[in-house]
Amino acid sequence: MSQKKIKQESYFASIKRRDPAANNFFQILFTYPGVRAYFSYKIAHFFFTHHMKFLAELISYFSRKHTGIEIHPGAKIGKRLFIDHGSGTVIGETAVIGDDVLIYHGVTLGATGTSIRHGEKRHPTIGNNVMLGANSTLLGAITIGDNCIIAANSLVLKDIENDTIVKTIYINKCDKKNISK
């Protein structure tokens, strides 16, 4: 599908395109926790940007309790974000997410924990058309370029250029001397 057509499609059509298990509008709306978290975020973000931060935080809290997905209402998220499965996903306050991003469960867009003054950027910026694999962790004020794939279980602490695939290397060799029988 061309980039122009993708940008014009509806949110629900974009989910059906990316998830073969998505059958219809009602199934997506009522059974996909990532969709409920995204819509709750939109409402919370409205209140957050209109200086009603307590109400925004309250909506965010109930959404997290209901879906298992934590999206800070201060984050800036583009169009057609799809959080598939979603459990354990965390998106921090200063995170910026572009359009048509796919996030799997357990992803963290977090800070490094180093001391930064209030209001300074401390969470990742994610470009357009990016896929973040399950349990990937992206920390700090880094930038992930457009059209990137971050593989499952990746730890990303540095900027990633456009059109890059970040892979995780697994080491499965065991030392036989340390295996108890």
Image: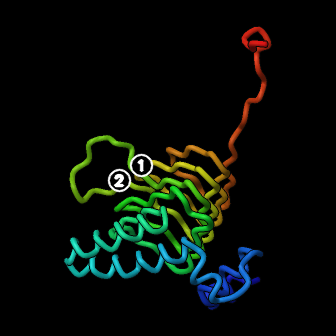
Is residue 170 rendered to the left or right of residue 162? right
Q: Residue at x 72, y 74 (%)?
A: 19
Q: Quadrant of residue 94?
A: bottom left
- Residue 140: numbered disc: 1
Is residue 146 rendered to the left or right of residue 60? right
Tell me the residue that label 2 is attached to.
122
Badge 2 amino acid = Arg
- As helix, strand or loop, the secondary structure at mark 2 comes to loop
Badge 1 amino acid = Gly
Q: Residue at x 40, y 80 (%)?
A: 42
Residue 1 in the image: state x and y as whole percent. 76, 83
Residue 63 in the image: state x and y as whole percent. 41, 70
Marks 1 and 2: in contact by CB < 8 Å? yes
Residue 61 vertical placement versus 11 (above, below)? above
Is residue 161 rendered to the left or right of residue 67? right
Q: Residues within 10 Å of mark 2 (few under 14, many from 20)?
A: many
Q: CA distance from mark 2 to mark 1?
A: 5 Å
Residue 65 vertical placement versus 155 (above, below)? below
Q: Residue at x 72, y 35 (%)?
A: 170
